Image (cartoon, grey):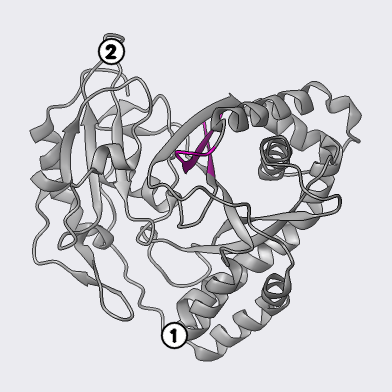
Amino acid sequence: MSGPRRPLDEVREMVESRVARLFPLTERLKADTPPEWTRVPEVDIRYHVREAPRQATVHTAHSLLGDWHDPSRPPWGVWLTEQGGDGTWNIHYVVHHARQDAGAALRTIVALLGDDEPPRWRSETGARSSSRGSKALLSLLPDLMKARLSAAKAPQAPQGRGRVLVCDEVQLDRLTAVARASGATVNQVHLAAFSEALDAWLPAQEEGSRRDVLVPVETSGTCLSDDFVNHLGLMRLELPVSGSKPDEHLRHIVRAAGRRRTATHRKAWGPLLHDASSRAVGWALRTTTDPTKVGMTASSVRAEFPLRLLGLPVLDVTAIPWLPPGHLCFALLVTYGDRARLSILAPEEAPDLAGLTRRWRESVEARAGAIDDFPAS
């Protein structure tokens, strides 16, 4: 953010006037079996909207939260940092991933602090259809059975509780230039560069072996639902390993994460999450996310440009991932304005994580510098 930092009390007043319209911010997670969200009688804005010290690096969720979170309250918070000598300051929004994905989190912070009043929330009032849920599960069944029978092995993740976050970025036009020249999507180009970076970062594997990553799929809008909750499905993606050439990574990603397959997952996961039984949803999620076979996630989100919060223009957006148990790393790309920024969270003991983001950036730059090698789309 750039410009005079708004007083904390002013920000709290603005959030308090809007929070009731955003029902996910008024619910806490009830630790029953199965767990469920339950409304709290009152949201204490002084608890949820705070100040944080300015620091040179990006705040992780843990550095903001510490022992802050009270499970009897909704799991979200807004922090304002101090204004630096260059006149800039930051707004941090942290939320439980079970409640919101990155896209929903972006929409929420804009609804809380943007120029326009948020609309009245619309709850998930669409009637459930067991037949629709069953059809969705059947459409995913070939992929789920392939995942269940897969011989892939997840890379061993360090077991420590500490976390390390690294970020790097490229100009967005570098990704779009390669996408236009190759006929791929921007996300496919990003995934190919990430795959190539992983090949150099992870220990060598046997020739012809495979590694799998999870690719979240946005399903918002595929059924009657709210815009401010987590609507992600998951797609398992097999990456090439063992000395694959750069072009082979991109060609493989274009096939494995093609538009048709992605659309199938998007259309199926929405009704599955909304209509299927909790037992069916649980089986599908456990099969897709089996930690013995997949230990990395590569996600992406596009932030609408330009954004304004508290009456001021947003200069930059960084999306910070979470780290599922047993995961080696979680990579989250956010595109905003003319930049694409990659953030990766990993266990503290993970070796040379900065090298992974650097290799991703170098791969994107190399592809953009050699676009004449790709056939015209």
The residue beneath circle 1 is 128
Residue 159 visible in this rendered orientation of the protein: yes
Quadrant placement of the N terminus: top left
Query: Picture coordinates of residue 116 (x, y %)?
Result: 28, 43
Amino acid of disc 1: Arg
Residue occupying the point 25% across, 56% down:
75
Marks 1 and 2 sit apart, C-alpha to C-alpha, by 51 Å
Residue 78 or residue 240, whichever sits in front? 240
For marks 1 and 2 on the same chain, the one whose residue lies earlier in the sequence: 2
Q: Which residue is mark 2?
A: 87
Q: Is residue 54 above or below residue 227?
A: above
Residue found farthest to the bottom: 131
**Label 1's element?**
loop
Q: Can residue 115 be seen here?
A: no
* Stretch of the chain drawn in magenta: 331-350
Left or right for 48, reference 302: left
Instruction: Give the residue displayed 26% in from the left and 23% down from the top.
Output: 54
